[in-house]
Image: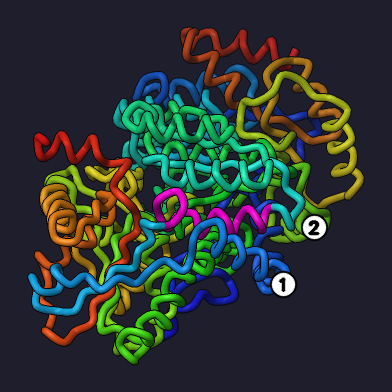
Amino acid sequence: MNYNINKKGYYGEFGGAFIPEMLYPNVEELRQNYLKVMAEPDFQKEFNQLLKDYVGRPSPLYFAKRLSKKYNTKVYLKREDLNHTGAHKVNNTIGQILMAKRLGKSRIIAETGAGQHGVATATVCALMGLECIVYMGEIDIARQAPNVARMKMLGATVVPATSGSKTLKDATNEAIRDWINNPVNTHYIIGSAIGPHPYPDMVTKFQSVISEEIKWQLKEKEGKEDPDYVVACIGGGSNAAGTYYHFLDNNNVGIIAIEAAGKGIHSAESAATSVLGKEGIIHGCKTLLMQTNDGQITEPYSISAGLDYPGVGPLHAHLYKTGRAEFYSATDKEAMQAGLELTKLEGIIPAIETSHALAIFEYKKFKADDIVVISLSGRGDKDLETYIKHFNL
Amino acid sequence: MNRINKKLQENKKLLSIYFTAGYPNLNDTATIIQNLEKSGVGMIEIGLPFSDPLADGPTIQASSTQALKNGMTTKVLFNQLQDIRKSVSIPLIIMGYFNPMLQYGVEAFCKKCQEIGIDGLIIPDLPVDVYHDKYKSIFEKHGLINVFLITPQTSDERIRYIDSVSNGFIYMVSSASTTGAQLGFGEEQTSYFKRIADMNLHNPQIVGFGISNHETFKQATQYAKGAIIGSAFVKFIKNSPLSDIKSFMRSIIG
């Protein structure tokens, strides 16, 4: 089985570029150039230098002793939460801003849900001195005030998406519309492994630094490169794609994905796309998405804004369909509990997105000598208010 | 011969109207179509509403959201159109995004269109190469013309390719924009219209996006075969009784 993207931009039957003709020149320009640009030595050099000196990579691979003891297995945490701006998102925005510069773009647009990708984009725009416009659902703006303030401090213009359900899906629609209206000078930094080809592949490749580091870090600690399992939470799936990437072709490494079950998979307030979704088209790619029988895209729900997306990236749809990855989903409650547990056992407050990945122990029993690497995709500072409310702190 | 091809052979400029099915009220569809034909409209694009219409501006977005709230679905639309050919003879096109068609089943969708007497489809997010590889034979089997868009940014080479895959007309998007975006045409548009006219394509071109009144209609049809009005009409029926459609059309055609 092949888990790489093919020439036409598909992972198996998922992917492609289902875009209006108005977007064709922008997407085509990117498609023709992205691999070439990424392979250029000076691009590589600048990308790696910034990851090291600005983001703070490599991020540690931390052996979680007390968590391991509790679940009687060997748990390593890949500390993406220690990156500048507090999550894995910045790996991709650094890559894409360098791409945009090489393509001669002067204006950057992005969508954001919780605001993490918006902050990561505003950050690299400040770093490079480029104009930055972030689309964010009106409802999300109201519930993520600190991140809105951060983006503004960084010089970005935050534009409320007032159409549809006024959340991430609609912010993405608005960003796409902006790109249609500004086809020449603008680059759209998509924040997840979604969108028309080549976005899922480009984002995956920028995030693949996560699994690249896991390999040599594990070699140092365990004397072997490959863990028994890699575990990540999935909304659109960029941290998961980066965590899995270098292990996809090695069937000895189990791949585990955790989606957000919200208030329960069948509660009608859920974001468990692999269970509730059907094949279809969302934001320019063919993948699994939550929709009505009539093909209207439905509104997901999760306590975590970063997982609150009605689709998954096409790579993940392929991993699900082929059985390469095991998919689970954790409810709000299970995730919050797992986040609290990590805090108490290891002194790390995780982002609520990440807490979903930590809830894997509810669902799967690992062997004592299994090496389980969990992507600690983000830190929980942004989520304090939700934690406070949930636990009456 | 398909009604669209036949219409395009007529020696006059064509006015085509887009409206969102199910808006302002769920069951206005047939009445709007009948009124449009009576008002001298040459062709109609019936919009199948979608939850996430990427290529559309605020007016059509809002009408789509409302139409879905009113209860519009693919099945409901087909039911409303079941007997439309008893009263209407101008070409009818369904315009919508690909996902609802995919969920209905592309073959079943095309078959139903043929039964009803739909002449063509416009699907902005179905790329020409995917259509060509996967769906062309199905569309043709059911006598449907598929219409593709070009924009000022589309390269000559790609326009030639789109022309070679098309068998009705080419939908010329007037500027780099979503629907309903602008107020008038400037020099940039005129030179684009001229450039395309000079390419002597096999398929006639019809201009859409940004046409809202007599002046823009005239400018657009100076070089092209016809023009499409969408957002301006959707705005009009929001605030006016359907019986006023005739006077709206008169103000456009002049």
Residue under label 1: A40
Instruction: Answer whether residue A177 is magenta in the image.
Output: no
- What amino acid is labelled 1 in the image? Glu
Given residues A315 and B32, the one toward you in this image is A315
Image quarter of the C terminus of chain A = top left
Residue under label 2: B160
In which quadrant of the rendered view does residue B197 lie?
top right
Front label number (2 vs 1) = 1
Q: Position of residue A99 (x, y in %)?
A: 66, 58
Mark 1 packing: few (<14 Cα in 10 Å), some, or many (20+)? few
Residue drawn 59% across and 60% down? A50
Q: Are the residues under badges 2 and 1 in a single subunit?
A: no
* Residue B120 visible here: no
Residue A347 versus residue A151 in the image, above or below: below
Find the magenta span and give its range. A83-100
- What amino acid is labelled 2 in the image? Arg
Residue A82 versus residue B90 in the image, above or below: below
Give me the chain letter of mark 1: A
Residue drawn 58% across and 48% down? A124
Q: Position of residue A373 (x, y in %)?
A: 28, 74
